[in-house]
Image: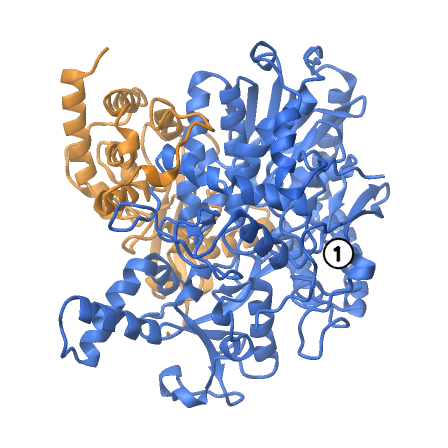
Chain colours: A blue, B orange
């Protein structure tokens, strides 16, 4: 029976009471305890820095050449916090409620409430580190709106909030490296968890420069390795983002929660051809000011500027008047797909909708003209003034769009289409962020815990930093306080020898096949199966086909791939083969999970389960649980449920109308 | 936007590892779409090379949206290629025309030894941060964010410096392989904020000392770094660093 270890007491007191009673480790003992952190994004870097500050001996691993390059860096829009600086009615409860509702009532109340509570500490911590958040003329912090909420609680640093927050955490981590509490292993990839007597006691890592395998002991291991959206091949994730660390843990016994919950982000630059290697997000913040539309007539091939106002369908404003263009991501994505599938798509592929700034440019232009006392400004002047304002707010995003598409978004509406962006599923963790393996933790995107079936914008950065700065430093003590007498285990221990052998056998196998197909080409095929049959809409027949197709593809992978080069050298193709091998198993599990969940919720939309208006139809009486999958030999899985109990919020159909 | 296909000749630096000598190798690539990114053109070439049993060309890349700073190709004599304020991954093949010859090299600097082909070791940048590129505050010590107002223009200037993605193009463009633009941007980010004041003097002294130790060259203010910086980091940061360095050197408590 799974125990989520949710503390007793009323929701708003759980975390405070927990902190007041959790077991502590004294400073002298902390110095003897070793912790491994895998991944150095917001969750990993903040955890490594904070645990180092507390005095633990930390080893941090990342596959990039510097911890500062982890993919958190690419987050654009912002980070939520219940500061209520705007005096617009925000509170911890509202952030908690919005997140639970946004997740379509498939996340744990206690975890989400804690997230909302610590959100305010995160902003303070980041400001103190020197994160250059956007500010108002009075010198105070600025906020913007984001999807799925009606208050302004999003803090931001132009269009690169992720980079600025990550630099803050990275600099704190580098400070600990200089002080000797954290040791950094860049260009290293974790390829196995080492278990001794049922507890996680270390990892096997591969040095990606020399190809050598290394054994590392620790009293506890923290996985902070991010999401697995690259199972779709095309996603907004970085090329190297992968599932390998959590997949190895899963194969060693860690339960995988809600694997099919994938977030498809509504505003991405559409695919331009078969050569496409990744997709680029245009921040959700663009939906603050941009209006989304398609022509009212099917297959309308006129230029957007030639389509008059009354012949445009602002379908989000039409369908969801209360939230308009700021509906949550899952809703916006499906609405775009619905219009394109019905024949109203734009661009050469017809798989795109317009994101139009004309109205915003005009509105800002009028305000500017008034501010600068130009009462007789003509349209041209107003447009020029408006463009200046838009450039200041979104300039870097507009530039990026132009570089990729060759079109000027100040003049022509942007073409956008949904793309895979985030995975809400991940390793199951309890309230303390521990997986079902004692001593093994999962933080940030790689755990399942806070976003249910759909994540709200500006909440990923919040969760990563909450887990790393403010949750794990408390909860890990509860485990490590019982480990103070455990001496470091020699890496000659049979468990290390055996784990290393598993890794080297696998690498040898990959290298020895020398077949005819590249890893990349098979990854693309897997991605296409996933996108077509386990993407924005899923149905039972498609999922059954996908499971079969993935099994066949996996067999091809293990019999016909060609990995060039040698084992003991810098070999990015081998790194990729190691990762794609794991995607080949994960993809099947995602389809199994999507097939088992006979309801629609959040990003998981089963065609068989929808309301008359085409909205997601949940079945709370049958599916109010987290689906946790246990790995069984021969690549099979068994389901273990964690029933979700809502003591405070009353689940209802999400309405954004 | 008009799409077209092109055939190109690539002259690419190949080097097995740090200890071997490198050389240029020539590759012909055909039917490259103007819609592709520069790295996607390399993907196409590498897929072909693997099929032909030739070792694919190693290059660093990750986010492919111009922010992680991993990509680092020296293209036709210019870090990140011909487009202004653009990383290699955001450079698109529209920048070239049918029949072009493109020369691709790794960053060349003593501080950035070659690992393989176009991949270099930039860990020197991390060590410069370790020397002092942070504000010494432990988690949990912070006061409410709005108790510390920051003038908007100062905050904006700090952000502009903090936009640096640590790619190293500035070093690669410099005839002396100086890291001054990078280091000065890192210093300016913190020096422009009130939070950065307590450690301002020691920070500049330690970071500059580490920069020298990492074998980066001296700055002679030619401005080549600013011209190629994908994030348009201003060379005025270097002036500020020099000023801070002099002030700190004359007055820091040792």
Q: Secondary structure at mark 1?
A: helix
Residue A385 x %, y %: 21, 69
Q: Nearer the viewer, residue A74 or A333?
A: A333
- Classify A172 as above or below A135: above
* Residue A165 picture quarter: top left
Compared across the picture, whether B22 is left or right of A469 comes to: left
The answer to whether one can see residue B33 in this image is no
Residue A250 x %, y %: 75, 39
Pinpoint the chain carrying mark 1.
A
Q: Nearer the viewer, residue B171 or A183?
A: A183
Q: Which residue is mark 1?
A: A553
Quadrant containing the C terminus of chain A in the rendered view: bottom right
Q: Nearer the viewer, residue B133 or A316?
A: A316
Quadrant containing the N terminus of chain A in the rendered view: top right
Residue A247 x %, y %: 71, 41
Q: Residue at x 52, y 20 (%)?
A: A54
Residue A489 x %, y %: 71, 14
């Amino acid at each position: 029976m799974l125990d989520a270890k949710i503390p007793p007491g009323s929701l708003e007191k759980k975390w405070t009471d927990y902190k007041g009673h959790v077991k502590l480790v004294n400073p002298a003992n902390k110095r003897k305890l070793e912790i491994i952190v895998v991944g150095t994004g917001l969750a990993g870097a903040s955890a490594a820095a904070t645990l180092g500050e507390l005095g633990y001996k930390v080893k941090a691993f990342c596959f990039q050449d510097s911890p500062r390059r982890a993919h958190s860096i690419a987050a654009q829009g912002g980070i939520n916090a219940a500061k209520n600086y705007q005096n617009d009615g925000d509170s911890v409860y509202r952030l908690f409620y919005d997140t639970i509702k946004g997740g379509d009532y498939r996340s744990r109340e206690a975890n989400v409430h804690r997230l909302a509570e610590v959100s305010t500490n995160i902003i303070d911590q980041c400001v103190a580190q020197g994160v250059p958040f956007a500010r108002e003329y009075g010198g105070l912090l600025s906020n913007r709106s984001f999807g799925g909420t009606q208050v302004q609680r999003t803090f931001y640093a132009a269009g690169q909030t992720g980079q600025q927050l990550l630099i803050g955490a990275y600099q704190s981590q580098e400070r600990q490296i200089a002080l000797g509490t954290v040791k950094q292993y860049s260009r290293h990839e974790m390829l196995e968890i080492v278990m001794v007597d049922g507890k996680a006691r270390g990892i096997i890592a591969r040095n990606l420069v020399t190809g050598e395998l290394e054994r590392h002991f620790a009293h506890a291991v923290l996985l902070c390795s991010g999401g697995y959206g690259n199972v779709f091949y095309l996603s907004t994730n970085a090329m190297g983002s992968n599932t390998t660390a959590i997949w190895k843990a899963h194969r060693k016994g860690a339960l995988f929660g809600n694997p099919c919950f994938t977030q498809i982000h509504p505003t991405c630059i559409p695919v331009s051809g078969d050569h496409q290697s990744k997709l680029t997000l245009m921040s959700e913040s663009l939906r603050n000011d941009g209006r989304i539309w398609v022509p009212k007539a099917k297959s309308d091939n006129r230029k957007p500027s030639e389509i008059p106002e009354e012949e445009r369908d602002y379908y989000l404003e039409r369908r969801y008047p209360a939230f308009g263009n700021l509906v949550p991501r899952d809703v916006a994505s499906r609405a775009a797909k619905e219009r394109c599938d019905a024949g109203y798509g734009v661009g050469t592929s017809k798989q795109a909708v317009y994101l139009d700034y004309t109205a915003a440019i005009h509105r800002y232009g009028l305000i500017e003209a008034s501010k600068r006392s130009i009462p007789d400004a003509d349209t041209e002047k107003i447009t020029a003034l408006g463009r200046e304002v838009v450039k200041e707010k979104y300039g870097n995003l507009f530039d990026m769009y132009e570089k990729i598409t060759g079109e000027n978004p100040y003049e022509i509406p942007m073409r956008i289409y949904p793309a895979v962006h985030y995975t809400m599923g991940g390793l199951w963790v309890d309230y303390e962020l521990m997986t079902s393996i004692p001593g093994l933790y999962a933080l940030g995107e790689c755990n399942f815990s806070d976003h249910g079936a759909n994540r709200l914008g500006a909440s990923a950065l919040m969760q990563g930093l909450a887990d790393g700065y403010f949750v794990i430093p408390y909860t890990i003590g509860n485990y490590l306080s019982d480990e103070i007498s455990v001496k470091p285990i020699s890496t000659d221990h049979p468990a290390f020898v055996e784990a290393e052998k598993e890794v080297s056998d696998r690498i040898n196998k990959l290298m020895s096949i020398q077949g005819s197909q590249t890893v990349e080409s098979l990854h693309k095929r897997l991605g296409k199966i996933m996108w077509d049959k386990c993407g924005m809409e899923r149905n039972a027949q498609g999922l059954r086909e996908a499971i079969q197709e993935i099994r066949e593809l996996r067999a091809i992978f293990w019999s016909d791939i060609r990995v060039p080069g040698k084992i003991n050298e810098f070999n990015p193709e081998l790194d990729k083969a190691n990762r794609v091998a794991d995607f080949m198993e994960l993809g099947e599990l995602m389809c199994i999970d999507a097939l088992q969940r006979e309801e629609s919720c959040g990003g998981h939309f089963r065609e068989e389960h929808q309301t008359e208006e085409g909205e997601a139809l949940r079945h709370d009486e049958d599916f109010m649980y987290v689906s946790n999958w246990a790995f069984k030999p021969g690549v099979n899985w068994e389901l273990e449920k964690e029933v979700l109990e809502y003591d405070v919020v009353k689940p209802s159909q999400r309405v954004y109308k | 936007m008009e799409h077209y296909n092109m055939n190109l000749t690539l002259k690419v630096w190949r080097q097995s590892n740090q200890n071997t000598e490198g050389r240029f190798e020539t590759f012909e690539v055909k039917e490259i779409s103007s819609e592709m990114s520069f790295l996607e053109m390399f993907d196409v070439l590498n897929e072909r090379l693997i099929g032909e049993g030739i070792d694919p060309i190693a290059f660093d890349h990750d986010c492919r949206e111009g922010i992680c700073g991993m990509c680092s190709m020296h293209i036709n004599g210019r870090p990140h290629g011909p487009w202004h304020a653009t990383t290699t991954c955001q450079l698109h093949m529209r920048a070239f025309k049918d029949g072009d010859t493109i020369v691709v090299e790794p960053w060349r600097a003593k501080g950035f030894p070659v690992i393989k082909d176009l991949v270099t070791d930039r860990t020197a940048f991390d060590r410069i941060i370790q020397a002092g590129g942070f504000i010494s505050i432990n988690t949990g010590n912070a006061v409410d964010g709005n108790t510390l107002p920051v003038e908007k223009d100062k905050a904006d200037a700090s952000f502009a410096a903090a936009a640096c993605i640590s790619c190293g193009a500035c070093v690669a463009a410099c005839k002396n392989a100086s890291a001054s633009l990078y280091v000065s941007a890192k210093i300016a980010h913190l020096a422009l904020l009130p939070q950065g004041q307590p450690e301002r003097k020691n920070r500049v002294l330690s970071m500059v000392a580490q920069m020298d130790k990492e074998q980066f060259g001296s700055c002679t203010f030619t401005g080549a770094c600013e011209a190629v910086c994908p994030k348009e980091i201003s060379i005025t940061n270097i002036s500020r660093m020099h000023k801070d360095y002099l002030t700190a050197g004359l007055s820091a408590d040792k």
